[in-house]
Image: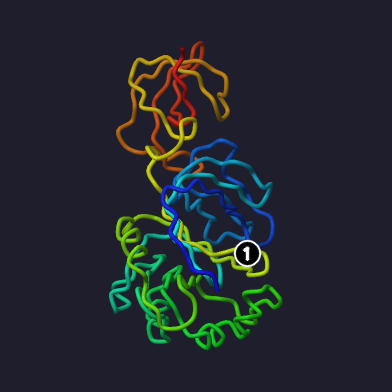
Protein backbone atom coordinates (compact mmCIF):
# COMPACT_ATOMS: atom_id res chain seq x y z
CA UNK A 1 0.00 0.00 0.00
CA UNK A 2 1.10 3.60 -0.61
CA UNK A 3 2.36 5.69 2.30
CA UNK A 4 -0.34 7.88 3.85
CA UNK A 5 0.16 11.63 4.17
CA UNK A 6 -0.96 14.80 5.94
CA UNK A 7 -2.33 17.72 3.91
CA UNK A 8 -2.58 21.02 5.79
CA UNK A 9 -5.15 23.72 4.94
CA UNK A 10 -6.29 21.75 1.90
CA UNK A 11 -9.23 22.83 -0.25
CA UNK A 12 -11.58 19.85 -0.22
CA UNK A 13 -14.99 18.73 -1.47
CA UNK A 14 -16.92 15.75 -0.13
CA UNK A 15 -20.30 14.25 -0.86
CA UNK A 16 -22.57 13.99 2.17
CA UNK A 17 -25.66 12.03 1.24
CA UNK A 18 -28.07 9.31 2.29
CA UNK A 19 -26.73 5.81 1.64
CA UNK A 20 -30.06 4.64 0.21
CA UNK A 21 -33.63 5.79 -0.32
CA UNK A 22 -35.08 9.22 -0.82
CA UNK A 23 -35.10 11.90 1.83
CA UNK A 24 -35.39 15.62 2.45
CA UNK A 25 -32.41 17.83 1.59
CA UNK A 26 -32.15 20.66 4.11
CA UNK A 27 -29.69 23.01 2.37
CA UNK A 28 -29.42 25.02 -0.85
CA UNK A 29 -26.52 25.84 -3.15
CA UNK A 30 -24.11 28.39 -1.63
CA UNK A 31 -25.48 27.95 1.90
CA UNK A 32 -22.79 28.13 4.60
CA UNK A 33 -22.56 24.99 6.70
CA UNK A 34 -20.99 24.02 10.00
CA UNK A 35 -19.63 20.52 10.71
CA UNK A 36 -22.65 19.53 12.83
CA UNK A 37 -25.22 21.15 10.52
CA UNK A 38 -27.88 18.88 9.03
CA UNK A 39 -27.69 18.19 5.29
CA UNK A 40 -30.40 15.58 4.71
CA UNK A 41 -32.95 13.49 6.59
CA UNK A 42 -34.11 10.03 5.55
CA UNK A 43 -37.82 9.26 5.08
CA UNK A 44 -38.01 6.89 8.04
CA UNK A 45 -36.43 9.16 10.62
CA UNK A 46 -33.17 8.09 12.20
CA UNK A 47 -30.07 10.24 12.51
CA UNK A 48 -29.67 13.00 9.89
CA UNK A 49 -26.72 13.32 7.54
CA UNK A 50 -24.38 15.96 8.99
CA UNK A 51 -22.06 18.18 6.95
CA UNK A 52 -18.82 17.24 8.70
CA UNK A 53 -17.18 20.28 7.08
CA UNK A 54 -17.19 24.03 7.61
CA UNK A 55 -17.76 25.67 4.24
CA UNK A 56 -20.41 26.04 1.55
CA UNK A 57 -22.80 23.83 -0.36
CA UNK A 58 -21.34 23.41 -3.86
CA UNK A 59 -24.09 21.25 -5.33
CA UNK A 60 -27.36 19.74 -4.14
CA UNK A 61 -28.08 16.07 -4.86
CA UNK A 62 -31.91 15.97 -5.05
CA UNK A 63 -33.52 13.82 -2.34
CA UNK A 64 -30.08 12.58 -1.24
CA UNK A 65 -27.77 15.28 0.09
CA UNK A 66 -25.11 17.70 -1.14
CA UNK A 67 -21.49 18.26 -2.15
CA UNK A 68 -19.78 20.37 0.52
CA UNK A 69 -16.63 22.40 -0.10
CA UNK A 70 -14.33 23.85 2.54
CA UNK A 71 -10.79 24.08 3.87
CA UNK A 72 -9.45 21.44 6.26
CA UNK A 73 -6.41 19.64 7.53
CA UNK A 74 -6.57 16.12 6.08
CA UNK A 75 -4.99 13.04 7.65
CA UNK A 76 -5.03 10.43 4.91
CA UNK A 77 -5.39 6.72 5.57
CA UNK A 78 -4.67 3.65 3.47
CA UNK A 79 -7.67 1.46 4.32
CA UNK A 80 -11.23 2.29 5.34
CA UNK A 81 -14.27 0.20 6.22
CA UNK A 82 -17.89 0.82 7.18
CA UNK A 83 -19.88 4.07 7.05
CA UNK A 84 -18.46 7.60 7.21
CA UNK A 85 -18.64 9.29 10.60
CA UNK A 86 -19.08 12.80 12.00
CA UNK A 87 -18.43 13.52 15.66
CA UNK A 88 -16.17 15.12 18.26
CA UNK A 89 -12.55 13.99 17.98
CA UNK A 90 -11.06 12.24 21.02
CA UNK A 91 -8.01 10.08 21.73
CA UNK A 92 -8.64 6.64 23.22
CA UNK A 93 -8.21 6.68 27.01
CA UNK A 94 -8.77 3.00 27.77
CA UNK A 95 -12.34 2.80 29.11
CA UNK A 96 -15.86 3.00 27.63
CA UNK A 97 -16.76 5.80 30.06
CA UNK A 98 -14.16 8.02 28.40
CA UNK A 99 -15.86 7.66 24.99
CA UNK A 100 -18.76 10.03 24.44
CA UNK A 101 -21.51 8.59 22.21
CA UNK A 102 -20.96 9.57 18.58
CA UNK A 103 -17.27 10.38 19.01
CA UNK A 104 -14.58 9.71 16.42
CA UNK A 105 -11.92 7.90 18.44
CA UNK A 106 -8.21 8.06 17.60
CA UNK A 107 -6.23 4.89 18.45
CA UNK A 108 -2.52 5.88 18.42
CA UNK A 109 -1.43 2.25 18.06
CA UNK A 110 -2.83 -1.06 16.86
CA UNK A 111 -6.60 -1.53 16.90
CA UNK A 112 -7.13 -4.78 18.81
CA UNK A 113 -10.30 -6.75 19.44
CA UNK A 114 -10.36 -5.50 23.03
CA UNK A 115 -10.08 -1.86 21.99
CA UNK A 116 -12.74 -2.34 19.29
CA UNK A 117 -15.11 -3.82 21.90
CA UNK A 118 -14.56 -0.81 24.18
CA UNK A 119 -15.28 1.62 21.32
CA UNK A 120 -18.46 -0.26 20.44
CA UNK A 121 -19.53 -0.30 24.09
CA UNK A 122 -19.00 3.47 24.26
CA UNK A 123 -21.10 3.91 21.07
CA UNK A 124 -18.36 5.61 19.07
CA UNK A 125 -19.30 6.56 15.51
CA UNK A 126 -15.84 5.99 14.08
CA UNK A 127 -12.31 4.78 14.79
CA UNK A 128 -9.16 6.28 13.27
CA UNK A 129 -6.41 3.82 14.17
CA UNK A 130 -2.77 3.59 13.24
CA UNK A 131 -3.03 -0.06 12.21
CA UNK A 132 -4.82 -3.38 12.74
CA UNK A 133 -4.51 -7.03 11.85
CA UNK A 134 -6.57 -7.97 8.77
CA UNK A 135 -8.17 -10.86 10.67
CA UNK A 136 -9.87 -8.37 13.02
CA UNK A 137 -11.52 -6.54 10.12
CA UNK A 138 -12.46 -9.78 8.37
CA UNK A 139 -14.11 -11.18 11.51
CA UNK A 140 -16.10 -7.96 11.90
CA UNK A 141 -17.27 -7.67 8.28
CA UNK A 142 -17.24 -11.31 7.14
CA UNK A 143 -15.28 -10.62 3.94
CA UNK A 144 -11.58 -10.74 3.04
CA UNK A 145 -9.90 -7.35 3.30
CA UNK A 146 -8.37 -7.59 -0.17
CA UNK A 147 -11.83 -7.98 -1.72
CA UNK A 148 -13.21 -5.08 0.33
CA UNK A 149 -10.38 -2.77 -0.65
CA UNK A 150 -10.45 -3.45 -4.39
CA UNK A 151 -14.26 -3.27 -4.49
CA UNK A 152 -14.72 -6.80 -5.81
CA UNK A 153 -16.95 -7.89 -2.90
CA UNK A 154 -19.21 -6.05 -0.45
CA UNK A 155 -19.05 -6.81 3.29
CA UNK A 156 -21.18 -9.75 4.41
CA UNK A 157 -21.94 -8.04 7.73
CA UNK A 158 -23.17 -4.48 8.31
CA UNK A 159 -20.36 -2.48 9.93
CA UNK A 160 -21.43 -1.09 13.32
CA UNK A 161 -19.12 1.92 12.91
CA UNK A 162 -16.57 3.39 10.51
CA UNK A 163 -12.91 2.38 10.70
CA UNK A 164 -9.90 3.98 9.00
CA UNK A 165 -6.36 2.62 9.28
CA UNK A 166 -3.84 5.41 8.88
CA UNK A 167 -0.86 3.19 8.08
CA UNK A 168 -2.47 -0.10 7.07
CA UNK A 169 -2.21 -3.63 8.43
CA UNK A 170 0.26 -4.59 11.13
CA UNK A 171 1.26 -3.04 14.45
CA UNK A 172 2.58 0.38 13.43
CA UNK A 173 1.96 3.35 15.77
CA UNK A 174 0.74 6.69 14.49
CA UNK A 175 3.55 8.77 13.03
CA UNK A 176 4.47 11.98 14.82
CA UNK A 177 3.05 14.33 12.20
CA UNK A 178 -0.34 12.62 12.56
CA UNK A 179 -0.37 13.03 16.33
CA UNK A 180 0.63 16.68 16.00
CA UNK A 181 -2.22 17.67 13.68
CA UNK A 182 -4.79 15.51 15.49
CA UNK A 183 -3.92 17.05 18.87
CA UNK A 184 -4.65 20.51 17.46
CA UNK A 185 -8.25 19.48 16.65
CA UNK A 186 -9.22 17.48 19.76
CA UNK A 187 -12.78 18.13 20.93
CA UNK A 188 -13.85 19.54 17.56
CA UNK A 189 -16.41 17.97 15.24
CA UNK A 190 -14.62 16.17 12.39
CA UNK A 191 -15.49 14.10 9.33
CA UNK A 192 -14.10 10.61 8.76
CA UNK A 193 -14.47 9.36 5.20
CA UNK A 194 -14.03 5.61 4.93
CA UNK A 195 -14.52 4.93 1.22
CA UNK A 196 -11.55 3.03 -0.21
CA UNK A 197 -10.98 1.57 -3.65
CA UNK A 198 -7.42 0.64 -4.50
CA UNK A 199 -8.13 0.13 -8.19
CA UNK A 200 -9.60 3.65 -8.48
CA UNK A 201 -7.08 5.21 -6.05
CA UNK A 202 -9.82 6.36 -3.67
CA UNK A 203 -8.40 6.77 -0.17
CA UNK A 204 -10.03 7.25 3.23
CA UNK A 205 -9.27 10.28 5.37
CA UNK A 206 -9.82 12.04 8.66
CA UNK A 207 -10.99 15.53 7.66
CA UNK A 208 -10.35 18.22 10.28
CA UNK A 209 -12.31 21.42 9.50
CA UNK A 210 -10.55 24.76 9.82
CA UNK A 211 -12.18 28.04 10.97
CA UNK A 212 -13.86 30.48 8.61
CA UNK A 213 -10.77 32.70 8.69
CA UNK A 214 -8.92 30.01 6.73
CA UNK A 215 -11.42 30.07 3.87
CA UNK A 216 -10.67 31.82 0.55
CA UNK A 217 -12.32 35.18 -0.07
CA UNK A 218 -15.84 34.58 -1.35
CA UNK A 219 -16.18 31.47 0.79
CA UNK A 220 -15.78 32.81 4.31
CA UNK A 221 -18.11 35.25 6.07
CA UNK A 222 -16.71 38.77 6.02
CA UNK A 223 -15.88 40.89 9.07
CA UNK A 224 -18.82 43.30 8.75
CA UNK A 225 -20.04 45.83 11.32
CA UNK A 226 -23.40 47.23 12.36
CA UNK A 227 -24.53 50.00 10.00
CA UNK A 228 -22.81 48.54 6.93
CA UNK A 229 -24.80 48.51 3.68
CA UNK A 230 -24.70 45.10 2.02
CA UNK A 231 -26.01 42.99 -0.82
CA UNK A 232 -27.53 39.59 -0.13
CA UNK A 233 -25.68 37.04 -2.28
CA UNK A 234 -27.47 33.78 -1.42
CA UNK A 235 -30.65 32.23 -0.12
CA UNK A 236 -34.27 33.36 -0.61
CA UNK A 237 -33.39 37.09 -0.38
CA UNK A 238 -30.65 36.86 -3.05
CA UNK A 239 -30.13 40.22 -4.79
CA UNK A 240 -31.73 42.35 -2.07
CA UNK A 241 -29.95 45.29 -0.46
CA UNK A 242 -30.04 46.14 3.21
CA UNK A 243 -28.31 47.54 6.26
CA UNK A 244 -26.83 45.52 9.12
CA UNK A 245 -28.63 46.33 12.37
CA UNK A 246 -26.34 44.17 14.51
CA UNK A 247 -23.87 41.33 14.15
CA UNK A 248 -24.74 38.40 16.40
CA UNK A 249 -22.06 37.53 18.94
CA UNK A 250 -22.70 33.76 18.81
CA UNK A 251 -23.38 31.38 15.94
CA UNK A 252 -27.06 31.48 14.99
CA UNK A 253 -29.07 28.28 14.57
CA UNK A 254 -31.04 28.54 11.31
CA UNK A 255 -34.25 26.53 10.68
CA UNK A 256 -32.24 24.01 8.65
CA UNK A 257 -30.21 23.21 11.76
CA UNK A 258 -27.08 24.94 10.45
CA UNK A 259 -25.08 26.97 12.97
CA UNK A 260 -23.25 29.89 11.37
CA UNK A 261 -22.06 33.46 12.04
CA UNK A 262 -25.00 35.77 11.28
CA UNK A 263 -26.33 39.32 11.35
CA UNK A 264 -29.69 41.00 11.83
CA UNK A 265 -30.41 42.88 8.58
CA UNK A 266 -33.03 45.49 7.59
CA UNK A 267 -33.85 44.91 3.93
CA UNK A 268 -34.58 47.97 1.80
CA UNK A 269 -38.36 48.16 1.48
CA UNK A 270 -38.70 44.92 3.38
CA UNK A 271 -38.59 43.28 6.80
CA UNK A 272 -35.79 42.64 9.24
CA UNK A 273 -34.24 39.20 8.73
CA UNK A 274 -31.42 37.16 10.21
CA UNK A 275 -28.98 35.96 7.53
CA UNK A 276 -25.60 34.19 7.48
CA UNK A 277 -22.64 36.55 7.19
CA UNK A 278 -21.44 34.28 4.38
CA UNK A 279 -24.43 35.48 2.30
CA UNK A 280 -23.65 39.19 2.70
CA UNK A 281 -21.34 41.35 0.58
CA UNK A 282 -20.48 44.99 1.39
CA UNK A 283 -21.81 47.57 -1.09
CA UNK A 284 -19.07 49.35 -3.02
Q: How many marks?
A: 1
Please name the residue shown 38% across and 67% down the image.
Answer: 101
The residue at which mark 1 appears reads as 201
Which of the 4 image quarters holds residue 22?
bottom right
Residue 230's x, y, as percent?
45, 17
Nearer to the camera, 167 or 190: 167
Name the residue rendered at 32%, 58% in the picture: 187
Q: Residue furthest front?
A: 2
The vertical placement of 274 against 231, above or below, is below
Q: Hey, which residue is sitting farthest right in the picture? A: 152
Residue at 59% x, 53% y is 15
Residue 119: image quadrant is bottom left
Q: Residue at x 48, y 66 (%)?
A: 4
Which quarter of the picture shows residue 234? top right
Q: Is residue 124 left or right of residue 157?
A: left
Q: Up-down: is 193 above or below 151?
A: above
Task: Tell me residue 284's x, y (percent).
Answer: 46, 12
Front-most of 42 and 128?
128
* Rendered view: 165 above or below 39: below
Q: Which colour scheme appears in the figure?
A: rainbow
**Dot 1 alpha-carbon crowd within 10 angstroms: few under 14, some 14 to 19, many 20 or more:** few
Q: Is residue 180 left or right of residue 6?
A: left
Q: Secondary structure under badge 1? A: loop
Percent from the top left, x then y, of residue 141?
Answer: 58, 82
Judge left or right: residue 98 versus residue 46: left
Q: Quadrant of the N terminus?
A: bottom right
Residue 113 in the image: above or below residue 258: below
- Please provide percent x and percent y for residue 24: 63, 49
Amino acid sequence: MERSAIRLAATVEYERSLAAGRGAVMVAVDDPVEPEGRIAQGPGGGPPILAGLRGRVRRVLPERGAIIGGVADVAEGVAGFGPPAVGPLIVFAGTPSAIMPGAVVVIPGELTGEVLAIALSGRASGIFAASAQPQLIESLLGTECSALLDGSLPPMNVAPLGIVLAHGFGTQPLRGEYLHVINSHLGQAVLMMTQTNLTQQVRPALVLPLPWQSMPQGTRPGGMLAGAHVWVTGGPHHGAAGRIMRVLTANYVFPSGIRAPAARLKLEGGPEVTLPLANLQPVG
